Image (cartoon, grey):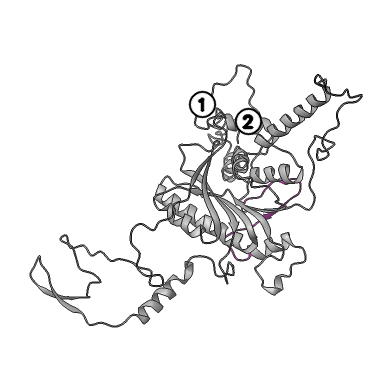
Amino acid sequence: MGKSSKDKRDAYYRLAKEQGWRARSAFKLLQLDEEFNLFEGVTRVVDLCAAPGSWSQVLSRVLIKGEKFGRCAWQDREAKFRRHMLNIVPPADGAPEQDEPASPPKDTPASEGPRPQREVKIVSIDLQPISPLPGIITLRADITHPATVPLLLKALDPDYDPSTMNQQASQPVDLVISDGAPDVTGLHDLDIYVQSQLLFAALNLALCVLKPGGKFVAKIFRGRNVDLLYAQLKIFFEKVYVAKPRSSRASSVEAFIVCVNFQPPEGFKASLEEPLGVGSRLPKMLAARNAAAPITAPVLMQNHSSGAWDFSPEPAATADEHGIYDVAVEDLSSGPRDGDVRWIAPFVACGDLSAFDSDASYKLPDDHVSLDPVQPPTAPPYKRALELRRANGGAYGKPPPIK
């Protein structure tokens, strides 16, 4: 959130700096929580791809400091106003007189300020360094590397012994969130593929630490075959939603997958040594499949264009009038299926419709003062370029010597 950013006319960009958030993405998590109540009963959280730390900042202020935002804050203010009115409004006609103001309900806290919570543990992981946050344990690690699991388990449980080689958390977490995304190239198919692989890496790590009934939230790029991803997540979670917060630009393919009630299949054991998908095992699997395939003699076929005869393998199906073979893939365990078997996750729009439009460009007031970023970048990609340019004498190089 630099001071000279081209997005300085974005309402959420300015609002984030006014409210002290490190990035405008904090509103995305707050709006997701309003819709799905993500933080209810949550005391242990893992934040993946956390830099610069806006989502971790939300977790720190909500779970540790006990602050409330959005709809929850509005409901608290309304409840406080009603209690205040009950204390000062005189009794109605016929009602007994009260010598002292009515006492608040027993379940009403004595203080209306934030109520800090205890026994909350939040671990944030990213390849980039993260500036410290109150109550947050930060790890600089790669979520795709198997060595990250022992580091995470050690951060969650100080008594964890890495020599046991156990990649399951003794004290699982309630919520795993991931706001990570690759550096987009502009090639949408490539960006969607890389983002899906990053999501699978986050899911593999989440399966190692998530407790049954837990929740998983991650960023996705919606594409042509994204429904396959929804169906794969549905294997591990009871409910899967696709959410689009109000603060996420409608012009972007970005969305968030919200998975509720973690229910691993019977006998499933997560490990980054054997992650979901084939990965590096693909050549071995193909070699084993080819070795197990039956050896068949070639079939003598005639080339319709030249009239010559050549040997070619027997087709797996008959060709149509255009010479195209259509092979039907069937699940032998459950028998052939008819029709469309795709599973499409429900799409949910999050956020108040009267809130700011993230795609709109609002007019700045006359007395607007541009604020400095809440947290400057710790290790920006352009840091080395700035150092080299400064060493060479600035943008135009060193001036020639004066004779």
Distance CA(mark 1)–CA(mark 2): 13 Å
Label 1's element? loop
Q: Which of 51 and 257 is in front in this view?
A: 257
Please report the bounds of the magenta region as a residue range: 128-147
As helix, strand or loop, the secondary structure at mark 2 comes to helix
* Coordinates of residue 303 in the picture (x, y in percent): 12, 69
- Sequence-wise, which precedes: disc 1 or disc 2? 2
Question: Where 302 falls versus 188 (above or below)?
Answer: below
Estimate the x, y position of residue 390 in percent, counting from the top left: 60, 39
Residue at 59% x, 70% y is 269
In this rendering, position of residue 46 left or right of residue 200: right
* Main SS, magenta residues: loop
Vertical order, 149 against 245 (above or below): below
The residue tagged 2 is: 15
Q: Residue 285 carries which label?
A: none
The residue located at (90%, 25%) in the rendering is: 100
- Asked whether 111 falls inside the magenta stretch, the response is no
What residue appears at the point 68 percent right and 58 percent down from the top-left corner?
173
Q: Quadrant of the N terminus?
A: top right
Asked if residue 138 lies in the magenta stretch, the reply is yes
State the residue position of label 1.
361
Does the image show residue 372? no
Q: Nearer the viewer, residue 189 or 371?
A: 189
Q: Residue furthest front?
A: 94
